[in-house]
Amino acid sequence: MKLNRGIVPALGLIAILTSSAAAQAPVSAWNLSEPCTYRNLAVFLIRRNDTHSDKKLMTLQEALAEKKIIVHETGSVNELSVENVSRDTAVFIQAGDIVKGGRQDRVLAYDLIVPAQSGRVPLASFCVEAGRWTERGKENARQFSESTGQLPGRALRLAVSSARQQGQVWEKVKEHQDRLGRRLNKNVADPLSPSSLQLTLEDKDLQTKVQDHVTRFEKCIADKPDVTGVVIAINGNIEGAEVYGSASLFRKMWPKLIRTAAVDAIVEYQPGRKYELVDKDEIVAFLTAGSQGKPIKTEVNRRTDVLRRENEINVSIETRDLRNKEAVIHRSYIAR
């Protein structure tokens, strides 16, 4: 077994990655697929029974497209407000979702379940665009039009989920743009707003390369209706994992997840180099590490709270639905 980033596994009794006694089950009971691979990217699917019962949840991307949610600009870089205007459907927002528009593009800082007819609910955010503070082109400066992207790069995700410093987020955005530019051998800053991470992610050459990856991976889950999570490995190292409380929510998030993983793999790709595949013991050790460290609890709203744990191996974030028997709806693991 090859152990990356100093992981020391406890492979005897493996406990699930949660502080909630209500949903405990052995990690070894999770059915990990054989990897789907393309170039330097490998994904392992996690197959298990649903633990969250709400199958009607919409994602932020869906709700914005169907005009069932409004994300309002507040004039504060680090706080927006969100309003679910649907009559009967809750909306799941995932930390790392990028919203485009307003006075500056933002990335959302916490997972959040927004109930139907919610009224305006505060939404913590970080700016992933610097300098602009007016409308961009024909966009609405008072609202955000879409959320098609997720925050790429471990360094950026850690800046949002762990350091929580706006200056560091801006710094990591610029670093990520520079690395993408070097990999694509071009300037990926959009003239309309050079500092916008979202506009960089929309670069046509980058999107062509991303679609090459998507085409390879889109069939991975086609015949697996019970997939609830994915572990991402790049260059033979585990980058992180995303695990959901239901297969239906995972399937809705899958397109964003695989496109973001593709961007990360493109940044790290080294032509001609071969990598040893991560083995399943490594994955178990990585996930097990997510239960280590003192939990820091944040009640995001009356429906959602978040437990964050940090250790030398990873940052793990568990989101619970307080109106649904405290069921875990999402767990995210970011490798250090």
Image: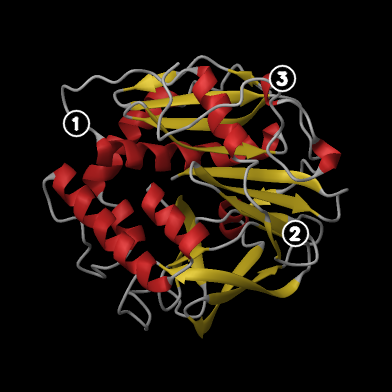
Q: Are marks 1 and 2 in contact (CB under 8 Å)?
A: no
Residue 111 horizontal side relative to residue 160, left or right: right
Secondary element type, mark 2: strand
SS category of the residue bearing label 3: helix
Q: Which residue is mark 1?
A: 270
- The type of colouring in the image is secondary structure
* Residue 206 coordinates in the image, percent (x, y): 26, 44
Quadrant of residue 252 in the image?
top right
Q: Is residue 268 left or right of residue 78?
A: left
* Crowding near the residue tagged with mark 2, few <14, some 14–19, many ≥20 C-alpha atoms within 10 Å: many
Which quarter of the rendered picture does the N terminus lie within? Answer: top left
Which of the two discs, 3 and 2, sits closer to the camera?
3
Residue type at mark 2: give it.
Thr
The residue beneath circle 2 is 304
> Alpha-carbon neighbours of circle 3 within 10 Å: few (<14), some, or many (≥20)?
few
Residue at 58 percent of width and 25 percent of height: 284
Q: Nearer the viewer, residue 240 or 132?
A: 240
For label 1, the SS is loop
Q: Quadrant of the C terminus?
A: top left
| Residue 212 coordinates in the image, percent (x, y) | 31, 30
Residue drawn where x is 53% and y is 26% of the image: 283
* Few, some or many residues within 10 Å of mark 1 (<14, 14–19, 20+): few
The residue singled out by tag 3 in the image is 29
Q: CA distance from mark 3 to mark 2?
A: 27 Å
Which comes before the other along the chain, label 3 or label 2? Answer: 3
Q: Earlier in the sequence, mark 1 or mark 2?
A: 1
Q: CA distance from mark 1 to mark 2?
A: 41 Å
